[in-house]
Amino acid sequence: MVSNMLEKDEDRDAAEDASSGCTIPSVIPPEIAGRYNLTRDPDVERDVSRYVEIESGNTVTNVEKIKTEYVLGDSYDIWDVTTDDGQWWVISNLLNLYSKNLFPSLDYTLSFHIGLMMRMRSKPNGPDAENPDPFDEVARRREQAEAAYERAIEAVHYQAVGMQLRECLISLSTALRRRMEVIIEGEAPQEANFKGWMDLMINQLCPGDANKELRQFLKTTSDKTWSLVNWLTHDRNANQTAASIALHACDMVFGHSIQILVRDRTDNVEECAQCTSRNIRSHYDAGILPDGDYYTTCGSCGWTSHPDGAERHDK
Ligand SMILES: [Zn+2]
């Protein structure tokens, strides 16, 4: 009823304006508005559309990237998405959608999203029975070391933290070995020879002159952490500060080891065939014959590895 009255008012206003030579344009439908957006990125927009359609069950009529925000070293892409039944904010990394009815303010939505992602990442990553991981044992021993640290009062208790951390480092070298094929020339180090195994693996994961500084840093930190933990185990004056530093030193060694193990995936080593930018994104198209395939696009110049090329968006 109200909307009918408004429409009539608008019609009358429009008619009056038309007669005076001044026409107030009506709202452009979202599916048409998108055509006038100058910074289109069709492959990413399609990924976002498909995500919203799966999650909301509605048909997407327009996707528009609003901006990219950088917070604490992470980037978050933000899209404004219109469907045939409601509007959404979609924020990346990890992709999530928020109804504009419930989240009218974009700033608030972004803060909420970043908080949610941080909580997800800091969830206790202890053993997960459904997804066993070679690093589960490392995580379990790390948690036991922390629990021992929190309850410790006497020197022997802090020494016990050192013992847990020692086992933890040995588990780490075992877990790393399960994730890669270690090339052994000559005699293999003994099972508990943490330093020996780490030297072999770091040489292999960080080869050549280009990696010299990184390799030396990783070897030195793992070697010194091993010494520190062993010293703590035997120190008759072991105390809270020493145990805390040993715990954090181990965390650093775990973090670096895992990072170096997966560096191929995180370093974006793939380059654009056209402009050599490393801004390469991966997409999936179920329409690629015979039964769907992944393809990549360049975020800098628009190059695509899709068999139909970039022209397919102009159809
Ligand atoms: Zn490019």
Image (cartoon, helix red, strand yellow):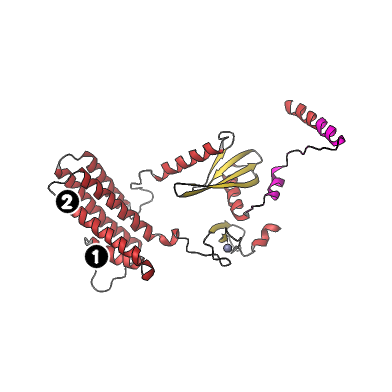
Residue named by callout 1: 196
Image location of residue 4, percent across then percent down = 76, 28
Image location of residue 194, percent across then percent down = 24, 60
Residue type at mark 2: give it. Thr
Residue named by callout 2: 233
Where are the magenta residues, as a range?
A: 11-40
Residue 32 position (above or below residue 309): above
At horizontal 52% and vertical 36% (from top left) the residue drawn is: 108
At horizontal 22% and vertical 45% (from top left) the residue drawn is: 241
**Occupied quadrant, residue 183:** bottom left
**Occupied quadrant, residue 211:** bottom left
At horizontal 77% and vertical 31% (from top left) the residue drawn is: 7
Residue type at mark 1: give it. Gly
The circle on residue 165 is: none
Q: Are marks 1 and 2 in contact (CB under 8 Å)?
A: no
In the rendered image, residue 3 lying in the magenta stretch gets the answer no
> On the rendering, which quadrant does ligand 1 occupy?
bottom right
Q: Which residue is more in the foreground, 58 or 157? A: 157
Image location of residue 158, percent across then percent down = 18, 45
At horizontal 55% and vertical 65% (from top left) the residue drawn is: 272
In this picture, residue 258 sits left or right of residue 30: left
